[in-house]
Amino acid sequence: MARAIDEFDLIARYFAPLARDMPGAMGLLDDAAVLRPAEGCELVVSADAIVAGVHFLETSTPFEIAQRALRVNLSDIAAKGAIPLGYTLTVQLPETINEAWLADFAAGLSSDQQEFGFGLLGGDTTRTPGPLTLSINIFGQSVVNKVIKRSGALSDDDVYVTGTIGDAFLGLALEKGDVSARVDEDRAALIDRFRLPQPRVALGAKLVGHAGASADVSDGLIADLGHICRASELHAEIRLDDVPLSEAARRLVTDNQPLHLSLLSGGDDYEIVFTAPQAARADLNSLSGEVGVPITRIGHMAVRETGTRPVAVIDGSGDQLEAGDDGYRHFKAAEPR
């Protein structure tokens, strides 16, 4: 009978190869790693965990799960204008996880390490009676004092968002059967956007010097722009018709304004919402073409009046819409009785 693999065999077989190009990882043979940013740079650190049944579907492949775990973290540092250096990974594995699963999972990590140019520094591996849980700490670098904070917006700044909004929300809704698509290609494209986020790493680093404030759109456009508003003590107005949608999303929300509005709060977009002075418009248009990612101006920042919501959504007639601003939250206050 074959001997069951223990955690040290698991690390040596599946995870140590992922650290091969990271000298500071010391082959995953030590209790810590060493990481030094380039001259004139400082570390930018973030962390995100994903849990089966909460952040990804049980039907997701191990390869997809690995990519999702890395990419939601990459999106965080991209929004700060940083480039990735390395990451640590904590895996809590149910008994149902076997070596075939681990091999495919490691292949997903390896694929994204090559695509985004960083590697594994260390982590922890354990069994759990609960759901599969993955936690990543990601380390990036940015030029000293150049990280793009949420608090840097100014009144009269333009508001921009990268890519398109709402695809992942609709992709999940399609997988769950909550909505239906008339075109098979639309269904496939939207589901792919949910299963495989596209963090704007190359673009994020180039926003340094242009963006005043930024956030990654993980909890929803309104919610994450609201974080910028609160940190900067300002108000934002965005135009519903200017929020960029893919053709597939547009076909689903045509003549359905409630569904259209829900795309602004659905989350899982992993785009970047940011502010920039009006003088930066031409430079940002050029940057969009340079990196091949759409950058769309969707509104502006303003002084926040007492009693107003952080973000107002305006329709084509100039009227404010009831869009809400909660976005996705793991912990919600109990409904009043």
Image: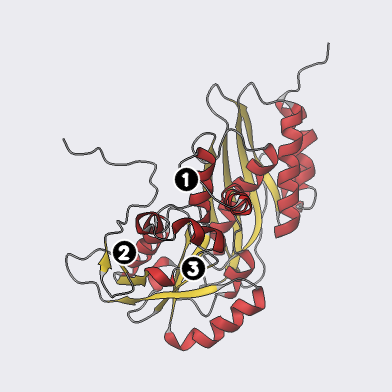
The residue lying furthest to the front in this view is: 182
Specify which label sits upstream in the sequence, 3 or 1: 1
Specify which label sits upstream in the sequence, 3 or 2: 2
Under circle 2, the secondary element is helix
Q: Do the residues labelled 3 and 2 touch (CB within 8 Å)?
A: no
Percent from the top left, x then y, of residue 148? 48, 70
Which residue type carries mark 1? Val
Q: Residues within 10 Å of mark 1 (few under 14, many from 20)?
A: few
Work out whether 56 lies above or below 149.
Answer: above
Q: Distance between the residues labelled 3 and 2?
A: 24 Å
Which residue is more in the foreground, 211 or 292? 292
Percent from the top left, x then y, of residue 225? 39, 64
**Quarter occupied by residue 239:** bottom left
Which numbered marker is on residue 179? Answer: 1
Which numbered marker is on residue 230? Answer: 2
Which residue type carries mark 2? Arg
Under circle 3, the secondary element is loop
Under circle 1, the secondary element is loop
